[in-house]
């Protein structure tokens, strides 16, 4: 990871999102679709620094992943397939569109595969069709953290803190609250308030 600036190594630890650092003034994000590179160059001076530029590049990459997908067939998937290796570039983490016929709504889900007492389990982090790039990135990073924490702790892993994923950044030290209004429920009620999270 020597080519990755120190201040963004945590963002790119699990996957690079097609990002490289060809020059000191910015990063390049590549996303090839049908032979065309849909990525771009993110100048640090235009984005207010290295970290903000990389976060913008990641958000754009996640938008493109959402739009095209690795196995895009031109239609919404109505069933979620749990893949051991995942389709996001992170082992055990998959991302797919799902369609709820009962509610006639479409949602994006990051699904994590794991085990409890030897029994296969899955945990989903779902987003509305109108979710923002920041929400996609937050859900993806949370899914990665869930999987990695399970890999480290195995049978002693406690998934209960992840019930607070819509109000806290569980992948950052201290598990800080998300900004005011980051998520809202279906009625428009803000969901940034939460009870204290036990360490």
Image (spheres, grey):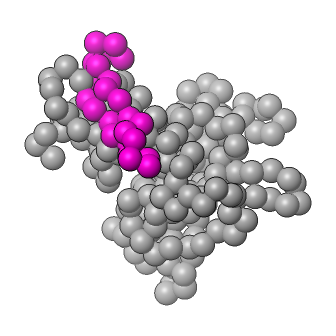
Image location of residue 101, percent across then percent down = 85, 61
Query: Which residue is depicted at the point 38% across and 35% down?
Result: 39
Of all residues shown, which one is farthest toward the right?
102
Residue 101 appears in view: yes
Residue name at image x 60 percent, y 34 percent? 132
Q: Is residue 170 left or right of residue 121?
A: left
Kindly identify the residue that appears in the image at 56 percent across and 27 percent down. 179
Q: With respect to residue 194, does 71 lie above or below?
A: below
**Residue 25 image point, x, y percent:** 19, 19
190 left or right, relative to 156: right
Q: Nearer the viewer, residue 32 or 121?
A: 32
Q: Which residues are magenta?
A: 27-51
> Residue 42, located in which quarter of the rendered image?
top left
Image vertical order of residue 145 relative to residue 155, above or below = above
Residue 56: percent from the left, percent from the top? Answer: 41, 29
* Front residue (pair 116, 20): 20
Residue appearing at x 42%, y 36% in the figure = 38
């Amino acid at each position: 990871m020597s080519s990755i600036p120190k201040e963004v190594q945590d963002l790119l630890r699990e996957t690079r999102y097609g990002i490289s650092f060809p020059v000191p003034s910015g990063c390049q994000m590549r996303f090839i679709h049908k032979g065309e590179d849909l990525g771009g160059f993110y100048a640090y001076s235009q984005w207010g620094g290295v970290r903000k530029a990389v976060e913008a590049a990641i958000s754009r990459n996640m938008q493109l992943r959402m739009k095209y997908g690795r196995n895009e067939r031109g239609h919404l998937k109505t069933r979620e397939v749990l893949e051991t290796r995942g389709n996001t570039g992170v082992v055990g983490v998959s991302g797919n569109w799902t369609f709820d016929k009962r509610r006639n709504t479409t949602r994006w889900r990051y699904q994590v595969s794991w085990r409890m007492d030897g029994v296969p389990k899955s945990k989903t982090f779902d987003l509305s069709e109108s979710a923002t790039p920041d929400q996609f990135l937050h859900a993806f990073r949370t899914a990665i953290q869930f999987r990695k924490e399970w890999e480290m702790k195995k049978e002693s892993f406690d998934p209960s803190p992840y019930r607070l994923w819509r109000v806290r950044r569980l992948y950052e030290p201290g598990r800080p609250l998300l900004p005011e209004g980051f998520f809202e429920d279906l009625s428009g009620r803000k969901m940034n308030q939460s009870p204290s999270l036990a360490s």
